[in-house]
């Protein structure tokens, strides 16, 4: 039996574009990743051994979960409709990049008095992070980068801290937590 054609120059059916593999859905550990193909039907597929609960749906999408941060591989054997019957017309491969799992802690916890420093810490995030980006929304917004960020707020109110962690593979994930700044009461 001869090898099926590769995705480099495989013919396509008239009026159809070349099959393309797409990765979507969640890019965080344990969440569902959706791998789909446009311009064809997936006949078979191969995923990295670490993939959990893989399933082919309607011949156009593969759903799977990946246990932890990293880059995994997917290969799909695709019928683009140009041949007769179900034949492999293209072999498409693509990396699936799973982001680090972000973890955000705020200290002190609970209500923070105005003027007191608030420390935001991403040190307990899982995975191989290359960057941390902080966005603090509320009456007195703030931004920063790095594994930790310390800010003092002079305006009371409800705030939201968003942490985005990026991995070496370029995948990023976010988490968010709220906190309250209360006016300092003079005695």
Image (cartoon, helix red, strand yellow):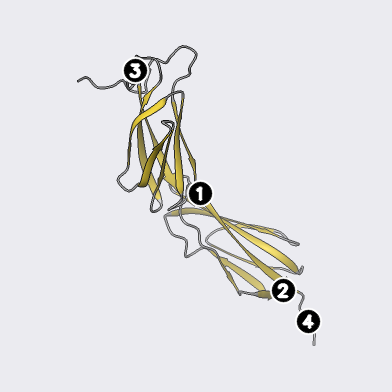
| Residue receiving disc 3 | 85
The one of 24 and 123 positioned closer to us in this rendering? 24
Q: Is disc 3 placed on a helix, strand or loop?
A: loop
The answer to whether mark 1 and mark 2 are in CB contact below 8 A is no
Rounded to the nearest whole Å, what is the CA distance between mark 1 and mark 2?
Answer: 32 Å
Residue 148 on image: x %, y %:
55, 64
Q: Name the residue under label 4.
A: 185
Looking at the rendered structure, which numbered label has been put on residue 172? 1
* Residue that carries the numbered disc 2 in the rendered image: 115
Instruction: Give me the residue at 54% from left, 59% from top.
Output: 146
Asked which quadrant contains residue 110, the reply is bottom right
Which of the two discs, 1 and 2, labels the residue nearer the N terminus? 2
Residue at the spot 50% in from the left edge and 58% down from the top edge: 102
Q: Is residue 183 left or right of residue 132?
A: right
**In the rendered view, does 146 fall on the left or right side of 94?**
right
In what element is the residue under mark 1? strand
Residue 71 position, x and y percent, is 38, 45
Numbered disc in front, either 4 or 2: 4
The quarter of the picture where the C terminus appears is bottom right
| Placement of 178 over or under 145, stated as above or below | below
């Amino acid at each position: 039996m001869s090898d099926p054609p590769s995705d480099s120059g495989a013919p396509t059916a008239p009026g159809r574009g070349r099959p393309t593999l797409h990765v979507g859905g969640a890019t965080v550990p344990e969440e569902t990743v959706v791998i789909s193909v446009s311009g064809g039907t997936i006949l078979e597929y191969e995923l990295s051994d670490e993939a959990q609960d893989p399933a082919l749906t309607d011949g156009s999408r593969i759903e799977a979960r990946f246990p932890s941060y990293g880059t995994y591989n997917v290969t799909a054997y695709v019928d683009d409709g140009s041949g007769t019957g179900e034949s492999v017309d293209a072999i498409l491969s693509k990396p699936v990049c799973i982001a680090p799992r972000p973890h955000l802690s705020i200290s002190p916890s609970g209500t923070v008095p105005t003027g007191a420093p608030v420390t935001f810490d991403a040190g307990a995030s899982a995975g191989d992070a290359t960057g941390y980006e902080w966005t603090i929304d509320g009456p007195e917004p703030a931004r920063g980068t790095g594994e930790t960020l310390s800010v003092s707020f002079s305006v009371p109110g409800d705030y939201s801290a968003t942490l985005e962690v990026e991995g070496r593979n370029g995948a990023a994930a976010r988490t968010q937590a709220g906190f309250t700044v209360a006016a300092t009461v003079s005695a």
